[in-house]
Each structure stands twice: as structure tokens, then as C-alpha cells.
Amino acid sequence: MAKIKKDDLVQILTGKDKGKQGKVLEVLPKKERVVVEGVNRVKRHLRAGQFGSTEGGIVESEAPIHLSNVALVDPETGKPTRVGYRFETVERDGETETVKVRYAKASGKELS
């Protein structure tokens, strides 16, 4: 199970984009990959009319990157951190319920 979700801010740990940070656009859990905004850009050569494109040419887009090569950015320090889970009791409408919450292991701060 991936601990990284869509719209999380992540940092690239290895590869040509090492050190860059970006927002997660898409998570592909079966392939254990994520698509990060502005990272791992590739060029595709398209013929006219291919994939709904009326015009041919070179299209640049983001390619998926493996989950092991990214780390979530701690909202408090701005540095990469591991993600953990903890259970917290919350009171809603007079009833107490247990909620599973993600948190940054470096600072202990709760992640949205």
C-alpha cells in the first residue's frame, strides 16, 4: 500500500531529477509508481491524428517514477521524511470514533 497520496508534496531521491520537489499528480498503486509535476519529463513524437491530437509534433509530458525514488516532504521542515500511521480518537456528534491518521515521522506533525 502506498503511503503517498495525490496532491502530496514529494522530493525526488535518485535519478536525473534528484533534489527536485513537486506535487503528486497521479498514483499508480498496481505499478508502484507516481507521476510528479515537473519531474521525469519525456518527449513523445506523435503523428497527426494520433491519440486525439489533430496536429503532429513533439509533446513533452511527465512519466511515472517508482515510489522508492520519492519521499514525502515534511510540512514543518521542508525536508524529506518517512510516513507513519497512528490511530487517534475523535469525538463527532457526541460519539467517539477511532481515526487512522498519517504523520511525518521526522517532526510528528499530522499530514492532511
Image: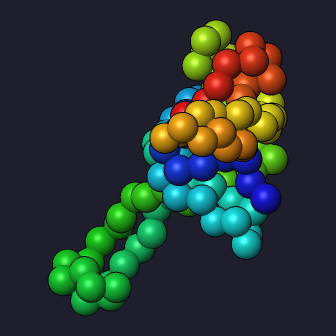
Q: Taking the image as drawn, is residue 47 in sight?
A: yes
The quadrant where residue 78 appears: top right
Q: In which quarter of the image is the C terminus?
A: top right
* Foreground of the two, 103 or 59: 103
Residue, x 70% and y 66% (percent of image)?
29
| Residue that lies at the very extreme toward the bottom in this rendered image | 49
Report whether 99 appears left or right of 23. Answer: right
| Residue that lies at the very extreme toward the left in this rendered image | 54
Expressed as whole percent of the image width and height from the top left, the position of residue 40 reads 57, 49
Residue, x 80% and y 23% (percent of image)?
105
Residue, x 58% and y 19% (percent of image)?
75
The quadrant where residue 45 appears: bottom left
* Foreground of the two, 72 or 95: 95
**How many numbered tags mark residues here?**
0
Residue, x 35% and y 66% (percent of image)?
58
Report whether 84 appears left or right of 50. Answer: right
Report whether 28 appears left or right of 50. Answer: right
Position of 109 relative to 44 (above/below): above
* Foreground of the two, 62 or 108: 108
Expressed as whole percent of the image width and height from the top left, the position of residue 111 reads 61, 30
Q: What sort of colour scheme is used for the picture?
A: rainbow
* Foreground of the two, 103 or 41: 103
Position of 58 relative to 54 (above/below): above
Q: Taking the image as drawn, is residue 39 in sight?
A: no
Expressed as whole percent of the image width and height from the top left, the position of residue 98 reads 72, 43
Expressed as whole percent of the image width and height from the top left, the position of residue 108 reads 75, 18
Q: Quadrant of the N terminus?
A: bottom right
| Residue that lies at the very extreme toward the top in this rendered image | 77
